[in-house]
Image (spheres, rainbow, N blue to C red):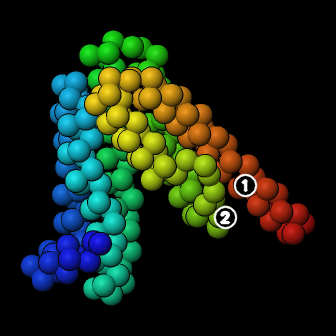
Amino acid sequence: MLAPFVNLFIRLGISPDVVTLVGTLGVSFGALFFFSQGWVWQGVLFITAFVFSDLVDGAMARKLGRKDDFGAFLDSTLDRVADGALFGGLALYFAWHAESRLYLALCLVILVMGAVTSYARAKADHLGYDAKVGIAERPDRLVGMLVPAFFADVLDLWILLEVALWALAVAATVTVAQRIWVVRRQALARAASQA
């Protein structure tokens, strides 16, 4: 489905890194502008158009046979920026429009736990462990927020988004705990084998 975009961008000489950057800027602008104005469903549509850049840039890099690691580093780093904008923008919605401290706090919990999830995996990789586990990785958090947010606004059923945020906050926290537990087991096994 994305092949026409991949081929077009390559033909135009667009770098996968540029696609990554534009996608991040689009998601960030969409979340911070639309959500903070209270235009939730419009923001979801705008953001969705840029979320697919995450798939396109990787496909472009594979098709070009790119060997360096910079693209993966840039993609992962800018994913954190986009996540911050998404849940930060939603936090602004709850601060300025819905006026709910509880759901503002839940957005911040999801934001922090999402960042820690990513950090835990990166640190585990650096130490030689495998922490690729968890019930709420980035795609789960994105879909789990964007879909309910869209329908909550369109159908005026805000409980859809509220339930989703509770579920995401719990799932993101559990994911961090899972990664800590898995790395702990690996660290103990490594220490025992070296004793």
In the rendering, which numbered label is found on residue 10? none
Which mark lies nearer to you, 1 or 2? Answer: 1
* Residue named by callout 1: 182
For residue 71, say whether it is visible.
no
> Which of the two residues, 102 or 164, is positioned nearer the viewer here?
164
Identify the element where label 2 is drawn. loop
For residue 100, say whether it is visible.
yes
Identify the element where label 1 is drawn. helix
The amino acid sitting under disc 2 is: Tyr
Instruction: Give the crowd class for mark 2: few <14, some 14-19, many >=20 residues within 10 Å.
Output: some
Residue sitting at x 22%, y 53%: 49
* Residue named by callout 2: 129
- Residue 155 horizontal/vertical position (percent): 32, 28
Residue sitting at x 32%, y 23%: 156
- Residue 56 horizontal/vertical position (percent): 28, 69
Residue sitting at x 52%, y 37%: 168
The amino acid sitting under disc 1 is: Val
- Residue 98 horizontal/vertical position (percent): 32, 15
- Mark positioned earlier in the residue sequence (1 or 2): 2
Q: Could you say which quadrant of the image residue 174 lies in?
A: top right
Instruction: Give the crowd class for mark 1: few <14, some 14-19, many >=20 residues within 10 Å.
Output: some
The outermost residue toward the front is: 155
- Residue 185 horizontal/vertical position (percent): 79, 56
Residue sitting at x 56%, y 40%: 172
**Residue 101 in the image: above or below residue 193:** above
> Which of the two residues, 135 or 115, is positioned nearer the viewer here?
135
**Residue 110 in the image: above or below residue 82:** above
**Horizontal side, residue 185 vs residue 35: left or right:** right
